[in-house]
Amino acid sequence: SQQGEEDPQALSIQEGENATMNCSYKTSINNLQWYRQNSGRGLVHLILIRSNEREKHSGRLRVTLDTSKKSSSLLITASRAADTASYFCATDGWGTNAGKSTFGDGTTLTVKP
Amino acid sequence: NAGVTQTPKFQVLKTGQSMTLQCAQDMNHEYMSWYRQDPGMGLRLIHYSVGAGITDQGEVPNGYNVSRSTTEDFPLRLLSAAPSQTSVYFCASSYTPGQHYGYTFGSGTRLTVV
């Protein structure tokens, strides 16, 4: 079963707007990562946030983590048409679950020019 | 170019045939893994390895074998292909789980079993 669940499944916005997608998970995590996948391509790592961190920034990306709610959000500011892609969260566990990264089903983002 | 290299990019198999998907990385990553991605879905972990000589099963290991004789290579073997194994397969690598900074993925192998 998938550990991470993204919400919404699909998101359509205009260029310049902000895009927010959410990820919920079920069990204790070591870290949470976000990836982008362009159609038919491999996944590209965007950002990793550790369980003892609450917020992280990278360029136009802002990730938050709320371990009490077992949820994370990815905010893309001032979106561009090139941001059109699917976005996935992945979680790494502790102990015997270390190395068993689990991915959600993704959010498909469409940015209209 | 440093990264994860997967071969072949496309493959068509007949039911019952066997084949090996190749994965190689040149970043001296200890951790390597194989995922499959079905249409409209996320990635499901097939097998993973935390170092040479060490492998373990993921969420969907049935019908697949792996071995890790070197740090660089992590091949995935389909023993007897079935139509249910039609999917896109991704190999990924990173430093030690829990200490890494994100996985590097290959570009994928698109497999069709007829």
Image (cartoon, coloured by chain):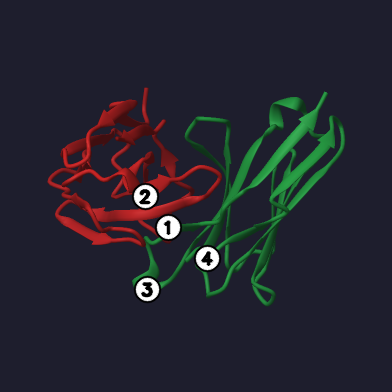
Chain colours: A green, B red
Tell me the chain of label 1.
B
Which residue is the site of mark 4? A3
Q: Is residue B5 left or right of residue A42?
A: left
Residue at 35% of width from left, 32% of height from top?
B109
Asked if labels 4 and 1 share a chain, the reply is: no
* Closest to the observer, B91 or B65: B65
Q: Quadrant of residue B25?
A: top left
Q: Residues within 10 Å of mark 1 (few under 14, many from 20)?
A: few
Residue at 50% of width from left, 63% of height from top?
A2
Mark 4 vs mark 3, foreground winner is 4
Three-letter residue code for mark 3: Gly
Which residue is the site of mark 2? B95
Measure the alpha-carbon separation of dots 2 and 1.
7 Å
Which residue is the site of mark 3? A95
Measure the alpha-carbon separation of dots 3 and 1.
13 Å
Residue B7 seen from this side: no
